Amino acid sequence: MKILSIETSCDDTGITIVEATGSIKNASFKVLADSANSQIKIHIPYGGVFPMLAKREHMKNLPILLEQVLKESKLEKKEKPVDAIAVTYGPGLEPALWVGITFAQELAKKWNVPVIPVNHMEGHIFSVFAKRKRFSISNFQFPMLALLVSGGHTQLILSKKWTQYKIIGETLDDAVGEAFDKVARMLGLPYPGGPEISKLSEAQRTRGKQFLRGVSQAGEPRGSAARARTDSDPEKIGFPVVLPRPMLYSKNFDFSFSGLKTAVLYLIRDIEKSRKLDSETKSEIALEFENAAIECLIYKTKKAIEKYKIKTIIVGGGVSGNEHLRREIEKFKKVELLIPEKKFTGDNSLMIGIAGYIQYLKRKRKFTKASNIKATGNLSL
């Protein structure tokens, strides 16, 4: 079957047409067309995504992208070009979500096809399978643990079967991607801040400023009295910036990044009492912040893998493109790691098409009326 998928949960507009076949346990996909438009440059002056501006841009972009994908897939002359439409209905910015939903409803009425509502976070789980042309989902090993990390979410998801998920850990305040952006703003870095923090951090690592032992191999988190000090410890090598690792000692799998963000704020305030925050100091703060944030993610993920005897670990969301996170999580042993291609780490409509097909199979073609689909900004898995 052919599925047209739509993504408008935040500031990326996307439409994809895929041809999908097979069962939930053995699904195959062929990408017929894929088109997207990023709004990053438009939102730079605001230092973040401005919801009503995002809504306006989605309204402008969707018809253009639709024309592009229909032409690319050679379906523009078909009276009924696809068999179903998959659309993100949450979580996300509700003004932006409504644009995609309304567009899907109008197309469904015109073509007389069903609309499949898709959870954006489930889309990020399936993003690890996405390829530019052809790909499949088969021989998948459960139980699966998904670490979903983005500007709006930080979650650990346990699954023993596709479409059935349990949140076993999540942030109690800021999402990790949000913390990256806020710290970048404190340091005077341009939006989007996450990649800028990582760029400075990678430059510092290249210069040998700090090489942390992978916490996935460590028996105790950094800062624990039980962990022996090594050359990777900033206290020993004279590294001037040391930040906390929030909630590493908690007995659950939840995260907190608000305290880490506040620690950076106080650190900058104290430094500026005596001297200017120069570029070298900014780079050192960026490095230690990234180390702290990633160590929290890695340590909790490792503990969850051990407790639930995980066979497959999935990492998805915009922060999954972070090089340091990828290096550290690749050190996990005895589990299969699935992580998306860089192109598919952010919001994209292809992942919505994949999740939409799996939902289509699960629901056995029984869907709510398209007119009943509502944007749900705080939708949970």
Image (cartoon, grey):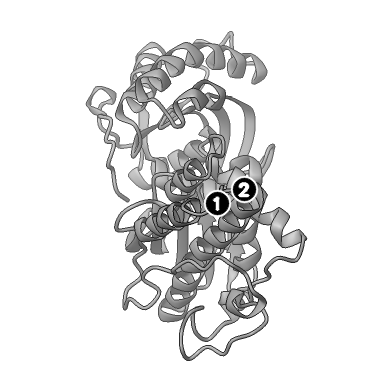
Name the residue: 52% across, 18% down. 81
Q: Amino acid at mark 1?
A: Arg
Name the residue: 46% across, 26% down. 83
Q: Is residue 141 visible?
A: no
- Which of these two is toward me, 362 or 310? 310
Q: Nearer the viewer, mark 1 or mark 2?
A: 1
Neighbour tally class for label 2: few under 14, some 14-19, many 20 plus, Cα within 10 Å: few
Name the residue: 42% across, 31% down. 10
**For the view shown, which residue lies furthest in the front direction?**
274
- Which of these two is toward me, 283 or 336? 283
Side of 202 relative to 345 (left or right)? right
Neighbour tally class for label 1: few under 14, some 14-19, many 20 plus, Cα within 10 Å: few
Is 194 above or below relative to 107?
below
Is 378 above or below relative to 39?
below
**In whole angstroms, how far apart are the C-alphas of marks 1 and 2?**
9 Å
**For the view shown, which residue lies furthest in the left direction?**
372
Q: Quadrant of residue 207?
A: bottom right
Helix or strand or loop: what does disc 2 sit on? Answer: loop
Helix or strand or loop: what does disc 1 sit on? Answer: loop
Which residue is labeled 2 in the image? 278
Q: Could you tell me residue 56's position as x and y percent?
A: 41, 14
Q: Could you tell me residue 370's position as x and y percent?
A: 29, 25
Q: Which mark is residue 229?
A: none
Which residue is labeled 1 in the image? 275
Q: Could you tell me residue 275's position as x and y percent?
A: 55, 51
Name the residue: 46% across, 67% down. 296
Image marks 1 and 2: residues in contact by CB distance under 8 Å: yes
Q: Could you tell me residue 172's position as x and y percent?
A: 29, 58
